[in-house]
């Protein structure tokens, strides 16, 4: 046993600079009572002063209150965190949460945050609760009402889906699996085009490393998988780490579809048998072994329903979800022939990327140009957000008093019916264009008088004799003659270059294929323009798919028929291809897949895809794989 002796004498000498004296009653009466060292008293005074200065600003702000769950779907025995967030003044005690039957709500604790930005002070107080389910089902946590000062604030109700306890962790022999995967969907019946939020939950014991899971699908298009949220779940006597990944899946055809299986590669820590001769093995980590492990989650079967034909509006463009519309125009005071920009925003939940704006009725009053659009998602999955369109219209006469009304139709999967939202016509004031410019008037008094003819005079004496007789230059001085003599040399060099190139192509199959693919791409792009002008949708997307296969096959050294979207992810992502190019390729493959089942595209839509195809092909040609 080691004894350590600590001396306090240097500290006393440093702190007091003189020997300690026993206080006398007189000295005690003269000196006021002090609490703690001077530094601590100074910090306490500063804190009190700062609190007094900030309290009017913090407490004076209006309170904003909202509630949220970190997970919308759990299994029996698992927990989700409920957060009650107060921006501004908060309650003096933890709020009471109404608890539905078969749910257990436990208070975890508060957290607070103060922020000062440009002199503006804000505070956020969060009360965290743990919600645990004892029975499966769909639950609604009612709105929480809290008294803050003299006002009462309320949150919105929150939905929680509880599934049956999974039997996944039990392996052969009744032992617990070290890791397993579950695929969770909010429902099993979906409509074609409806965006479905899917959760991939990875359970792991003694995790060392974790990779992004891979989800295989049949008849779905997938978005990007989000970064996981982490929690814990107790199953029997084991506590698993739970990593929840989220992805948006959209069915593209009807019938029975399969979502999964999901596969995740992990590395887990295992304890080795202890060596009795090495007492320090556990201390230095020699008793831990890391092994790779692959966890596979079983697939889920879903039924994709077709959109009903009854009640389908004429301007329906395939949107499925819940949406609202807003619009405005500028300028509203214009001249005939001046462009007016209409800005239309469609906000809601659904596949925002595929939303299309119905064509405006133009007639003879307006000239309408194709709209441009951009998407601003408000969540990680891109399920909700705003898609903004800019439509340029040009008025053709001064009798126009308003811009055309806007109607947008979509299918509501919850109500199972079509809905049409409208925006009223926008009032405008159109003035006639200016007439021809008046011709300038020339006054009679300002006319320039005619100049008198110059007087005739004798011819001046020449200082130089000049050319006595014209003559033709020699042929050697003619540029065309010199160029004609160089023509045989140029032809010989071209023939030599052509022969060397043919030999190089013959000895290099990859280079020969590259030249062939370049020729195919040039010819294919010409065909795309022709097919787009003729509005031949099927042939157009078949040509796009063939060009992508040819170019990708040449870069990856694979047959063109072996190129699929999965091969793009497996090969190009490993080679460090930029994410922008991968997203362009995924978008084109998605468009090709949708063209097999979606209605025909318009000429403008087909023509707008050609620059994207050209950009993707140029990006592939520039790659060095």
Image: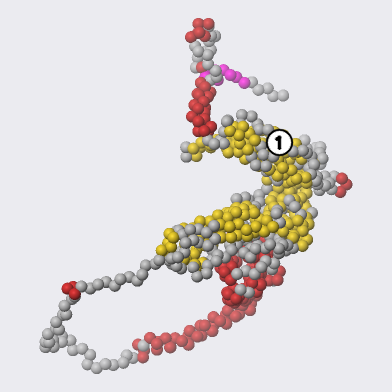
The secondary structure making up most of the magenta span is: helix
Q: Reply yes or no: does residue 13 show up in magenta.
A: yes
| Colour scheme employed for the rendering of this structure | secondary structure
Is 149 positioned to the left or the right of 221 in the image? left
User: What residue appears at the point 16 percent right and 80 percent down from the top-left corner?
Assistant: 451
- What residue do we see at 63% from left, 79% from top? 506
In the displayed structure image, the side of residue 60 where residue 270 appears, left or right: right
Q: Nearer the viewer, residue 432 or 175?
A: 432
Indicate whether 108 appears above or below 45.
below
Q: Is residue 114 visible?
A: yes
Q: Residue at x 35, y 71 (%)?
A: 436
What's drawn in magenta, residue-wise? 6-15
Residue 485: give x, y in percent of width and height.
43, 88
Horizontal and vertical percent position of residue 47:
52, 27
Work out which quarter of the rendered image holds the N terminus and state it. top right
Q: The residue tagged with tag 1: helix, strand or loop?
A: loop
Q: Quadrant of residue 422?
A: bottom right
**As drawn, 533 above or below 57:** below
- Look at mark 1 in the image and give the residue it sits on: 98
Crowd rating for badge 1 (residues with CA inside 10 Å; few <14, some 14–19, many 20+): few
The answer to whether residue 223 is above or below residue 545 is above
- Residue 78: x, y in percent? 76, 41
């Amino acid at each position: 046993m080691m004894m350590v002796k600590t001396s306090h004498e240097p500290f006393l000498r440093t702190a007091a600079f003189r020997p300690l004296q026993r206080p006398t009653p007189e000295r005690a009466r003269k000196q006021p009572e002090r609490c703690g060292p001077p530094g601590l008293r100074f910090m306490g005074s500063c804190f009190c002063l700062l609190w007094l200065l900030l309290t009017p600003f913090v407490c004076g702000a209006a309170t904003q209150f909202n509630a949220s769950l970190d997970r919308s779907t759990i299994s029996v025995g698992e927990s989700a965190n409920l957060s009650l967030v107060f921006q501004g003044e908060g309650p003096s005690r933890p709020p009471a949460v109404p608890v539905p039957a078969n749910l257990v709500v436990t208070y975890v604790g508060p957290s607070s945050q103060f922020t000062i930005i440009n002199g503006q002070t804000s505070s956020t107080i969060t009360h965290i609760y743990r919600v645990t389910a004892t029975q499966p089902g769909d639950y609604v946590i009612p709105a929480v009402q809290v008294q803050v000062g003299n006002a009462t604030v309320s949150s919105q109700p929150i939905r929680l889906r509880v599934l049956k306890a999974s039997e996944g962790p039990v392996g052969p022999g009744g032992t617990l699996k070290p890791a397993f995967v579950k695929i969770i969907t909010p429902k099993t019946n979906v409509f074609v085009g409806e965006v479905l939020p899917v959760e991939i939950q990875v359970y792991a014991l003694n995790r060392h490393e974790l990779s992004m899971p891979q989800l295989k699908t049949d008849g779905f298009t997938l978005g990007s998988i989000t970064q996981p949220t982490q929690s814990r779940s107790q199953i029997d006597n084991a506590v698993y780490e739970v990593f929840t990944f989220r992805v948006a899946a959209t069915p593209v055809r009807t019938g029975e579809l399969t979502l999964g299986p999901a596969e995740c590669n992990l590395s887990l820590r295992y304890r080795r048998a202890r060596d009795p001769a090495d007492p320090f093995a556990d201390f230095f980590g020699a008793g831990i072994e890391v092994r790779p492990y692959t966890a596979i989650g079983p697939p889920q079967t879903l039924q994709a329903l077709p959109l009903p034909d009854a009640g389908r509006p004429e301007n329906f463009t395939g949107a499925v979800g819940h949406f609202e519309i807003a619009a405005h125009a500028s300028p509203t005071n214009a001249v005939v022939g001046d462009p007016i920009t209409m800005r239309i925003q469609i906000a809601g939940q659904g596949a925002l990327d595929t939303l299309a704006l119905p064509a405006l009725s133009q007639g003879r009053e307006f000239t309408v140009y194709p709209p441009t659009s951009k998407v601003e998602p408000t969540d990680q999955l891109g399920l909700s957000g705003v898609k903004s369109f800019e439509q340029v219209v040009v008025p053709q006469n001064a009798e126009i008093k308003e811009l055309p009304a806007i109607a947008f139709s979509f299918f509501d999967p919850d109500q199972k019916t079509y809905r049409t939202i409208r925006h009223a016509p926008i009032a405008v004031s159109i003035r006639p264009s200016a007439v021809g410019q008046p011709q300038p008037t020339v006054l009679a008094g300002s006319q320039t008088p005619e100049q008198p003819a110059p007087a005739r005079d004798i011819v001046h004496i020449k200082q130089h004799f000049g050319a006595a007789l014209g003559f033709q230059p020699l042929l050697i001085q003619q540029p065309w003659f010199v160029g004609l003599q160089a023509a045989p040399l140029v032809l010989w060099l071209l023939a030599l270059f052509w022969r060397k190139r043919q030999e190089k192509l013959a000895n290099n199959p990859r280079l020969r294929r590259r030249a062939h693919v370049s020729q195919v791409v040039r010819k294919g792009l010409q065909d795309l323009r022709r097919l787009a002008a003729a509005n031949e949708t099927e042939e157009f997307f078949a040509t796009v798919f063939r060009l992508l296969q040819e170019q990708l096959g040449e870069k990856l050294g694979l047959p063109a028929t072996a190129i699929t979207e999965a091969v793009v992810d497996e090969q190009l992502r490993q080679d460090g291809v930029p994410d922008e190019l991968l997203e362009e390729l995924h978008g084109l493959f998605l468009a090709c897949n949708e063209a097999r089942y979606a209605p025909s595209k318009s000429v403008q839509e087909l023509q707008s895809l050609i620059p994207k195809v050209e950009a993707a092909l140029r990006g592939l040609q520039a790659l060095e794989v």
